[in-house]
């Protein structure tokens, strides 16, 4: 569970694009990506051998329970904060230290954020425990705790800035603050997406130019980019040293403008065959070419517009009903912040299926692009795509038949089964309409 609802909103845009999320059991044979093609039997659908299926089902059940529990837990924590009047206590403390509102905010927000983070930390700890138990993570607890602290520090900075802006705007425009605040968040989100790959991501992981570690792979990738009529310069391709922490396969597109780039995790480059990596890259290239980052930002702008409009109404309604009981003076009182967070969390929960559906749509487009851009580059590219999905699913114990409602509500990618079935039956080349993206 993300510790604070703020982070949900701020990270929503970026989360949309992580492509091959998942994990796998470790395979201790690092080797450079050469022209490897390990032909196994034809894939007709996503299947797991019995012992892996049992493990996948157990993991699926645990994660589903954790997900549902996390949803409720986040709301309960904020409700308890309000009922115990922790906001007013922190506000009084801040007011005793300084009469300056700016300084009070600098004291209040970090304390509140850290308090909520501490309350939510058992769930984070349990999640890491599960990842270790299933061999999906190899990260030590000390390293994990370091990342957790760094994440909270980033959150504190972003949240403090957001709160300073929010209350200033509410004071200036008590009726239309929701609109002005929405307007101001947009350039900040763009800035955040812009700096994420160069400032935030390197806090947690090491990135090296793909050309340094996988020169042969970069050569092969250039064939794919040429096929798509696109020039992604090699200095926009990076390898992430993911194997230090996880055993997961992943590749993703991130950044904006001058920082836009494709990142491949070293595990992916190590374990998959060259054609499989090229398909994965083709998928990521789809996100890149089809401007999914910009589309994601536009989508975020639209959905947060509705969210702020509705959010203001709910905050005001809650304050008019409970402000006395919660010892909140008015909407500009710092102590009202947990109410904002509660409303933000509720809105994030109800908007999740909309976000997920949009994300699944983009992922599906990227899959189509990946299938088309690799068509004719190597034999049987549909089978290669299916094999890469099978590998991804199998190594991450991805459960083959998740509940359709859960998929609709929370899956940011189509299921592995759906992706394999689509890939195997995708054949537009002999039809009159032809391919969708690569003519
Ligand atoms: Zn993707």
Image (tube, rainbow, N blue to C red):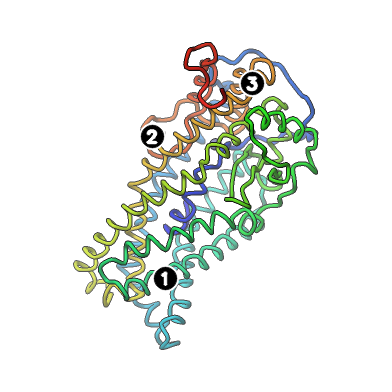
Q: Residue 98: where, in percent of width, then height?
A: 44, 87
**Which is nearer the N-term, disc 2 or disc 3?**
3
Among all residues in the image, which is located at the extreme left?
Answer: 321
Question: Which quadrant contains ligand 1?
Answer: top right
Q: Residues within 10 Å of mark 1 (few under 14, many from 20)?
A: some
Q: In the rendered image, which residue does mark 2 sit on?
A: 408
- Give 308 or 61, whichever is nearer the viewer: 308
- Give 14 or 415, whichever is nearer the viewer: 14
Name the residue at 68% across, 30% down.
226
Q: In the rendered image, which residue does mark 3 sit on?
A: 384
Q: CA distance from mark 2 to mark 1?
A: 35 Å
Quadrant (top left/top right/bottom left/bottom right) for the C terminus: top right
Question: Is 270 left, or right, of 280 in this rendering?
Answer: right
* Callout 2 secondary element: helix
**Which is nearer the N-term, disc 2 or disc 1?**
1
Q: CA distance from mark 2 to mark 3?
A: 27 Å
């Amino acid at each position: 569970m993300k510790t604070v609802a703020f982070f949900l909103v701020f990270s929503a845009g970026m989360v949309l694009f992580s492509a091959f999320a998942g994990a796998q059991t470790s395979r201790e044979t690092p080797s450079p990506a050469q022209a490897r093609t390990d032909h196994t039997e034809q894939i007709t659908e996503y299947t797991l051998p019995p012992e892996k299926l049992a493990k996948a089902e157990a993991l699926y059940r645990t994660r589903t329970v954790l997900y549902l529990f996390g949803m409720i837990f986040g709301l309960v924590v904020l409700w308890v904060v309000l009922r115990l009047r922790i906001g007013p206590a922190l506000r009084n403390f801040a007011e005793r230290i300084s009469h300056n509102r700016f300084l009070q905010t600098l004291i209040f927000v970090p304390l509140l954020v850290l308090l909520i983070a501490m309350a939510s930390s058992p769930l984070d700890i349990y999640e890491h425990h599960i990842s270790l138990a299933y061999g999906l993570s190899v990260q030590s607890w000390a390293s994990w705790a370091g990342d957790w602290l760094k994440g909270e520090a980033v959150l504190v900075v972003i949240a403090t800035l957001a709160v300073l802006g929010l209350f200033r705007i509410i004071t200036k425009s008590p009726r239309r603050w929701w609109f002005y605040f929405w307007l101001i968040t947009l350039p900040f989100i763009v800035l955040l997406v812009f700096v994420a790959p160069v400032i935030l991501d390197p806090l947690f992981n090491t990135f090296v130019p793909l050309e340094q570690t996988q020169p042969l792979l970069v050569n092969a990738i250039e064939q794919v980019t040429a096929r798509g009529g696109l020039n992604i310069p090699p200095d926009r391709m990076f390898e992430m040293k993911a194997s230090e922490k996880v055993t997961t396969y992943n590749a993703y597109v991130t950044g904006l403008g001058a920082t836009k780039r494709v990142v491949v995790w070293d595990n992916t480059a190590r374990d998959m065959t060259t054609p499989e990596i090229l398909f994965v890259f083709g998928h990521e290239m789809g996100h890149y070419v089809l401007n999914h980052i910009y589309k994601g930002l536009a989508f975020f702008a639209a959905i947060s517009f509705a969210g702020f409009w509705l959010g203001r109404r709910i905050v005001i309604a809650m304050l008019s009903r409970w402000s006395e009981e919660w010892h909140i003076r008015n909407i500009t009182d710092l102590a009202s912040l947990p109410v904002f967070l509660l409303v933000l969390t509720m809105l994030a929960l109800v908007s999740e299926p909309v976000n997920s559906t949009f994300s699944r749509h983009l992922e599906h487009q990227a899959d189509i692009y990946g299938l088309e851009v690799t068509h004719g580059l190597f034999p049987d590219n549909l089978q290669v795509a299916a094999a890469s999905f099978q590998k991804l699913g199998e190594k991450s114990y991805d459960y083959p038949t998740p509940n359709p409602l859960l998929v609709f509500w929370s899956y940011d990618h189509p299921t592995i089964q759906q992706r394999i079935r689509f890939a195997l039956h995708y054949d537009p080349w002999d039809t009159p309409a032809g391919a969708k993206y690569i003519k």
